Structure formats: C-alpha cells, structure tokens
Image: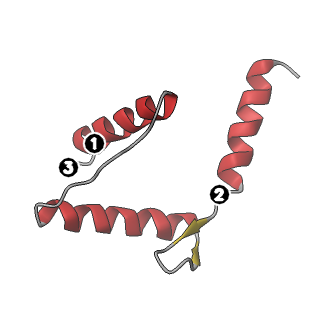
Amino acid sequence: MTYYKSYIKSTFDALHNLVVTNDKEVELNVEDGFEQWCLITKELNDNGGTIFFIGNGASAAMASHMSADANKNGGL
C-alpha cells in the first residue's frame, strides 16, 4: 500500500472509530458531541470566557491552527 493510501486509511479509521463523551463520560454520537462543543464555546464567548487550545511540538501547531479556525470560521 502506498504511503498516501495508508495515510488516508488511518485517518478514516481514526475518525470512524472516534468516541465522543460528555463531561459525565456518557458516550454521544459525533454530531451531538460537535453540537455540544459549538454551544459551549458560544456560551463561553458570549459571557467573555476564554478557550485555550494547548499542545506541545506538532500538537502546538494543531492547537494554533484550531485557535485560528475558531477565530476566523467560528467568530470567537
């Protein structure tokens, strides 16, 4: 298998097997989890709260990218 196909397969597998839970560790479907995240971040933003994206090394780059996307695309 080529590197590209292997990368796409591993990304698909990771997303397909994603488990999302709430703060009480109750499993949610991915769509409900994403909707809850959107509601929580909007409430935080509306009330002057702060959201921190944290990472180290390559994860710091991902955190920076998520922060930029939340600002640019999410209006936070």
Vertical side of 12 occupied by 58: above or below: above
- How many circles with numbers are drawn on the protein? 3
| Relative to 52, 23 lies left or right | right
Q: How is the image coloured?
A: secondary structure
Location of residue 60 in the rendering, given as x and y in whole percent from the top left corner: 42, 33
- 10 Å neighbourhood of mark 3: few (<14), some, or many (≥20)? some
Q: Name the residue under label 3.
A: 76
**Residue under the point 23% across and 42% down:** 71
Tell me if label 3 and label 1 are in contact, CB under 8 Å: no
| Relative to 29, 62 lies left or right | left
Spot the residue most to the front. Answer: 56
Tell me if label 2 and label 3 are in contact, CB under 8 Å: no
Q: Quadrant of the N terminus?
A: top right
Q: What residue type is labelled 2?
A: Leu
Q: What residue type is labelled 1?
A: Asn
Q: Name the mark on residue 73.
A: 1
Q: What residue type is labelled 3?
A: Leu
Residue mark closest to the camera, 2 vs 1 = 2
- 10 Å neighbourhood of mark 2: few (<14), some, or many (≥20)? few
Spot the residue most to the top. Answer: 2
Q: Name the mark on residue 18.
A: 2
Label 2 and label 3: CA atoms lie apart by 25 Å
Label 2 and label 1: CA atoms lie apart by 23 Å
Spot the residue most to the right. Answer: 1
Foreground: 51 or 14?
51
Which SS class for mark 2? loop
Asked which quadrant contains residue 17, the reply is bottom right
- 10 Å neighbourhood of mark 1: few (<14), some, or many (≥20)? few
**Disc 2 or 1, which lies upstream in sequence?**
2
Vertical side of 59 occupied by 21: above or below: below
Location of residue 39 in the rendering, given as x and y in whole percent from the top left corner: 30, 68
